[in-house]
């Protein structure tokens, strides 16, 4: 295992209520809140992990999906290494809106080569009985739009949550050179007592 830690920024996008904050909180704090409040602006949490022998510090940016918060979230898209496009399986509209989220990200992050940018698609709330989007349909959208990996998750049951964030890291490692992101040793303190930040313009 390399002693150098790679700092990667991943961003969660998707309609309000699909479970972006719940996925981040499940992954970083292993907690789930069935009465979660809508996010206002953006928040981020860090977690260290090891993927294929590489030590990575994942900086997860969670955004507010509601339309009225668009101007608060878009300034934080720049510099993202991976974008997790999230929908909820019990909400067909949130699946249809994936194209708009992708477009919004590409525009505000100023992605130069969208066809090479690592997107990962997450269908969340796998635990729910009622389902409005089939696996085949979601996989079809992913292959038609750039061959994105697709994972079905449940923040509630902790299904595939770790796998989703690890897949994001794998996509970045596969597609990019990382020299600029390398943090030597542990001189940058990403683990201060309050390792989360909330931001709002
Ligand atoms: N059953 C179930 N409920 C979930 C799951 N993930 C999130 N929820 C619930 O769905 C609601 C919305 O979750 P959030 O994580 O706040 O959604 P969000 O995408 O962050 O929403 P915004 O902050 O408004 O963009 C909350 O009541 C969560 O408890 C899941 O995997 N299964
Ligand atoms: Mg939220």
Image (cartoon, rainbow, N blue to C red):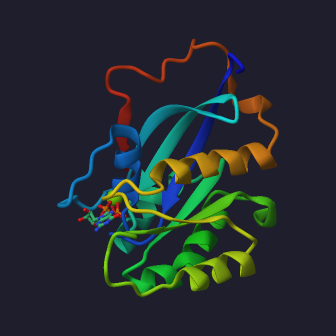
Identify the residue shown where x is 63% and y is 13%: 185
Task: Work out which residue is located at the far left of the displayed protein and give it.
Answer: 35
Which one is nearer the viewer's eye here, 2 or 199? 2
Residue 134 rendering spot, x and y as whole percentages: 51, 84
Which one is nearer the viewer's eye here, 161 or 25? 161
Give residue 127's quadrant in the image: bottom left
Identify the residue shown where x is 42% and y is 87%: 132
The answer to whether residue 166 is above or below residue 131 is above
Which one is nearer the viewer's eye here, 166 or 15? 166
Residue 72 seen in render: yes
Query: In which of the image's four quarters is ligand 2 placed?
Result: bottom left
Which one is nearer the viewer's eye here, 163 or 180? 163
The answer to whether residue 151 is left or right of residue 28 is right
The answer to whether residue 141 is above or below residue 201 is below
Residue 182 rendering spot, x and y as whole percentages: 70, 26
The answer to whether residue 60 is above or below residue 95 is above
The answer to whether residue 135 is left or right of residue 156 is right
The answer to whether residue 29 is left or right of residue 27 is left
Which quadrant: the N terminus? top right
Identify the residue shown where x is 39% and y is 84%: 131
Residue 94 rendering spot, x and y as whole percentages: 44, 79
Give residue 107's quadrant in the image: bottom right
The answer to whether residue 94 is above or below residue 123 is below
């Amino acid at each position: 295992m390399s002693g150098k830690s790679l700092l990667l920024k991943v961003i969660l996008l998707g309609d309000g209520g699909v479970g972006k904050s719940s996925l981040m909180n499940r992954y970083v704090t292993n907690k789930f809140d069935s009465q979660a409040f809508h996010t206002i602006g953006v928040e981020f949490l860090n977690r260290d992990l090891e993927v294929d022998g590489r030590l990575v510090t994942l900086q997860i940016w969670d955004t507010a999906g509601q339309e009225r918060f668009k101007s608060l979230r878009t300034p934080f898209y720049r510099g993202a290494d991976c974008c997790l496009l999230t929908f909820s399986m019990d909400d067909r509209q949130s699946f249809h809106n994936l194209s708009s989220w992708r477009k919004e990200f590409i525009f505000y992050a100023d992605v130069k080569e969208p066809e090479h940018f690592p997107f990962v698609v997450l269908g969340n709330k796998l635990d729910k009985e009622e389902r409005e989007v089939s696996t085949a349909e979601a996989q079809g959208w992913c292959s038609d739009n750039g061959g994105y990996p697709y994972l079905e998750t449940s923040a509630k049951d902790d299904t595939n949550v770790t796998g989703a964030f690890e897949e994001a890291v794998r996509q970045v490692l596969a597609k990019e050179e990382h020299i600029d992101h390398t943090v030597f040793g542990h001189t940058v303190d990403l683990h201060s007592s309050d390792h989360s930040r909330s931001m709002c313009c």
